[in-house]
Amino acid sequence: AQDAVKAQDKNRSYLVYLVNWSVEALRQSFENSDLVRLPSLQTSRYQVKSANRLIEALWAGVPVWAHATPAYNEFSSFVTCDNNTYSGVKRALIREDYPDIIRDGQIHIASNYSPEAIAKKWKNVLWQA
């Protein structure tokens, strides 16, 4: 199911879609989005989530606005982390340097999270065991 919520600031209005998660919905959403929103409850249960959703969105080339979580700290140079809805959307959408930020984030992901980088990390761990 897809629900749309209208949001606006002084100069623009936006439609925000809430989409049930699936791999296909994720890919389609990236293609059709100007911004990916990654909310998280600020409870201990949700503070241990991985950065997988953030990595996927950034890798797809979409600007990301996320609630701050420990897993996202590593990516704070490449995404907008703000727990406030109004300021988060505003900060995320007014940035003009997103192409450079996204490129830098993708370089970081390729260096640290590509299959080759992960294999190298596993090899180092296994050789130390």
Image (tube, rainbow, N blue to C red):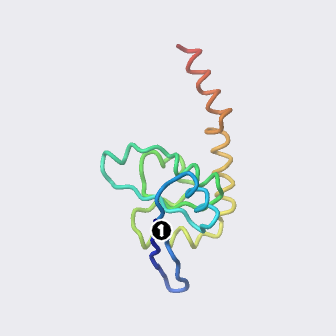
Q: Amino acid at mark 1?
A: Gln
Would residue 59 appear left or right of 25 to someone viewing this image? Answer: right
User: Splitting the image into 4 quarters, where does residue 97 fall?
Assistant: bottom right
Give coordinates of residue 79: x percent, y percent: 55, 57
Front in this rendered view, residue 40 or 128: 40
Instruction: Assign a secondary structure to mark 1.
Output: strand
Q: Give the number of marks.
A: 1
Give coordinates of residue 114: x percent, y percent: 65, 38
Q: Is residue 87 above or below residue 39?
A: below
The residue positioned 41% from the left and 69% from the top of the image is 85
At label 1, counting other C-alpha atoms closer than 10 Å, the crowd grade (few under 14, some 14-19, many 20 or more) is: few
Q: Which residue is mark 1?
A: 2
The residue positioned 31% from the left and 46% from the top of the image is 44
Give coordinates of residue 28: x percent, y percent: 61, 61
The residue positioned 47% from the left and 68% from the top of the image is 2
Give coordinates of residue 68: x percent, y percent: 42, 54
Q: Is residue 21 above or below residue 18?
A: above
Would residue 40 appear left or right of 127 to someone viewing this image? Answer: left
The residue positioned 64% from the left and 45% from the top of the image is 108
